[in-house]
Image: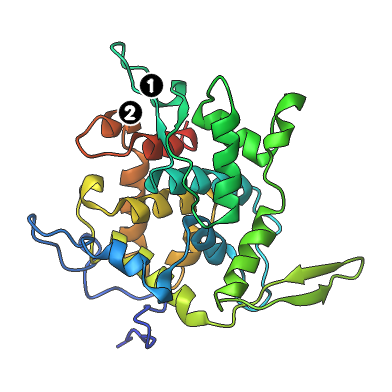
Amino acid sequence: MSTVSQRNTGLIQRKNISSAQGAEGGTNKLQEDENPYENDEADHDSKETRLTLMEEILLLGLKDREGYTSFWNDCISSGLRGCILIELTLRGRVELEKAGMRRRSLLNRKVIFKSATGTGDVLLDEALRHVKETEPAETVQNWIEYLSGETWNPMKLRYQLRNVRERLAKNLVEKGVCTTEKQNFLLFDMTTHPLTDNGVKQKLIKKVQDAVLSRWTNDPHRMDKRMLSLIYLAHASDVLENAFAPLSDDDYEVAMKRVRELLDLDFDVESMKEGTNELMWAVISSFSK
């Protein structure tokens, strides 16, 4: 009888076998009154896991040994800009304007500057300055286009954040996760950033897997906002598959089924529920329109 081999990190190696957990559950259900993410913010602030959403998305996309993202991935650029907006709103620096009496949709509402307090991150502070200095305010979709440089308006090109992946990779180098190397690709040399501390990436992958398996709640509002954003933006950036690839076939099917449930939500409705972050849902909605 086939068995499932398991790494020390707890990641299940994906093989063509039937999982003992069953296709529907995948893992144990949580009690309704439990909040599995109540300690996540403290965990995020620990020295070991202090990564921004942008760094986590890039880390999921980086090839471990080669140290660069897939040449075929044309989604990660805009995905990283979405991460920047969500990171700013989770830190209380920007917010979405009020819906008003007519309940305007998320994508029609503007990003409002809230606080000029520095974040300690160069990319975040640069984006925050752009939002602060822009009048009239712009929508989430416009900001993603401006920060990516994907706009036909030449007056808005000054908002483009340049060399984002390289700057994020250097952050990962400074945090001891990656190193810097030069690789020759026949016609050109390229700076790459192979992993030096694979444990950080494996822990991140395990957290993403657990969020849709053992810690699944059937209610996105009971999930940690940072993890929920990571799942949505990893999907939008075409790197979520990298987190699910090591799973057994049955767990993989369960994980993808639950991701599809998240993608099928009505984001405008979700944004109206108590305790939500409307700008977070607006960013998510912009990638699902």
Tell me if residue 152 can be seen: no
Amino acid under disc 1: Ser
Indicate the position of residue 76 as horizontal and vertical percent values: 60, 51
Quick one: 195 or 146, which is closer to the camera? 146
- Where disc 1 sits, the SS reads loop
Residue 22 in the image: above or below residue 5: above
Q: Quadrant of residue 69?
A: bottom right
Q: Check the picture and name the quadrant holding the N terminus.
A: bottom left
Residue 114 as seen in the image, left or right of residue 18: right
* Label 2 close to label 1 by CB (< 8 Å): yes
Residue 269 as seen in the image, left or right of residue 170: left
Indicate the position of residue 42 as horizontal and vertical percent values: 29, 66
Q: Tell me which label, 2 or 1, sits earlier in the chain.
A: 1
Residue 26 as seen in the image, left or right of residue 247: left
Given the current orientation, which residue lies at the most extreme front position?
Answer: 117
Using a 10 Å C-alpha cutoff, classify the residue at mark 1 as few (fewer than 14 neighbours), some (14 to 19) or many (20 or more): some
Amino acid under disc 2: Asp
Q: Which residue is mark 1?
A: 105
Residue 80 in the image: above or below residue 47: above
**Residue shown at the point (64%, 34%) measured from the top left:** 146
Q: Which residue is mark 2?
A: 268
